[in-house]
Image (cartoon, grey):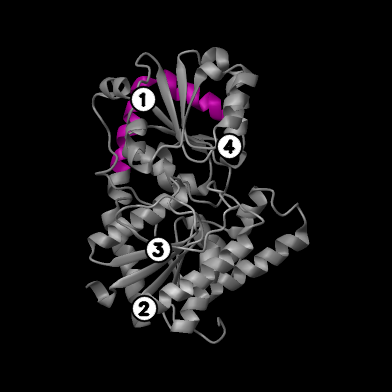
Amino acid sequence: MEFGVRRVMMIAPTPFFADRGCHVRILEEIKALKKRGIDVFVVTYHIGRDVPYVRIYRTLNVPWYKKLEAGPSIHKPYIDLLLLLKACLVCRKERPDIIHAHLHEGGWVGNFCSKWYNIPLVLDVQGSMTDELVAHNFLGGKKWVMSFFRHIERGIVRKADAIMVSSENTTRILREEFSVDDKRLFFVPDGVDTNFIHPVGDKEALRRRLNLPVDKKIIVYVGVLSGYQGIDMLMEAVANAKDRLKDVLFLMIGYPEDKYRSMAKMYGVDALFSFVGKVDYERIPEYIEAADVGIAPKVSKTEANGKVLNYMAAGLPVVVFDTPVNRFMLGELGIYAPLGDAVGFVSKLIWILDDTEFAKEVGDKLYRRLIERFSWDAISEKIVDVYHKVRRGVKGERSGNDR
């Protein structure tokens, strides 16, 4: 067994598995680690879809909490207390070699288990907890509330033996705003299984099988549908440019879709949008592979944007807002609009749709970039190396100041 790591307990403070970005990273990590002979099991909320090849321990059922979409909730504090109880019980039973905690709430839970059972804690973060709460308008714009959550976040990140970050921007935030020592920071980007999703030669046959139009340009979006993901502003901007988008179909894969169906009718663009709703993760590749362009209008400056890598894996050009996270994945090959400029976003989209030859060239280059930088085989090696370092105490030594 590699580096003496046989069992890993992942803590997922989320309704795993729910066919969305954060969950995809968790699942792909599990698959990649299992290929290396490591037994991985997950402690998570009472809701979510079971995955046949993943051992999942769930918290006590809370019948009234059924939220699958991303974002904060007033119910999270007591749900996370139940997660803490379950994680401690599972940790006692399984005695893992590593606790791999996802997101900041997972880090909070994992710290208790780590201290009680003397097991190294690896924290896997995809952005700033406080920045996410601000972006979701959860803190009401009050500075003292923001300062309070900054204090909590600082305590969480300082207690982990190692922190894995998925973007260089998050690394900068942890280093500069939370004074995390470089010894405990490890850059582990999102990745894609290129056997799972890849370019296809015959899009027309695929579209016919999926009952999609073969005579239109298809723009695909995969993920949670929300204002936080930029969908509201996107639809308004599309409505203002609908005369230039007559031969286009926006294929929206995600949920909750009812609000946006109504919005499309209100704006008079319902003919331009197809809301497929929730699609099992295993079926998502064929929808992406059938498209011409991928879009990811997420407005966060710090959070991961993993759907971009799936678009790259299918050889699609990608239209995004200009953020450090997107720049890291796409480099100079991204089709960028200024952050928050929905009109500019749609203009860039129309431009790349009109230049078919250039779009194909960009998509091919993005696929090659993905193969070189973001395959899970290479990334899982980085993860195991982090495990090795915290097990051996080479880096991320526990100090009294951090405890």
- Foreground mark, 4 or 3, reads 3
Percent position (x, y) of residue 79? 58, 62
Q: Residue furthest bottom?
A: 400
Percent position (x, y) of residue 401? 57, 84
Mark 3, other Cα within 10 Å: few <14 / some 14–19 / many ≥20: many
- Give the residue type at disc 4: Gly
Q: Which mark is residue 358?
A: 1
- Foreground mark, 2 or 4, reads 2
Gap in Å between the C-alphas at discs 4 and 3? 31 Å
Residue identifier under label 4: 230
- Give the residue type at disc 3: Val
- Give the residue type at disc 2: Arg
Q: Which mark is residue 95?
A: 2
Gap in Å between the C-alphas at discs 2 and 3? 13 Å
Q: Secondary structure at mark 4?
A: loop
Q: Find the magenta span and give its range.
A: 344-369
- First in residue order: circle 4 vs circle 1: 4
Percent position (x, y) of residue 256? 55, 37
Percent position (x, y) of residue 91? 42, 75
Q: Secondary structure at mark 3?
A: strand
Residue at 22%, 73% (x, y): give it.
1
Q: Secondary structure at mark 2?
A: loop
Gap in Å between the C-alphas at discs 2 and 1? 54 Å
- First in residue order: circle 1 vs circle 3: 3
- Give the residue type at disc 1: Phe
In the figure, residue 260 lies in which quadrant?
Answer: top right
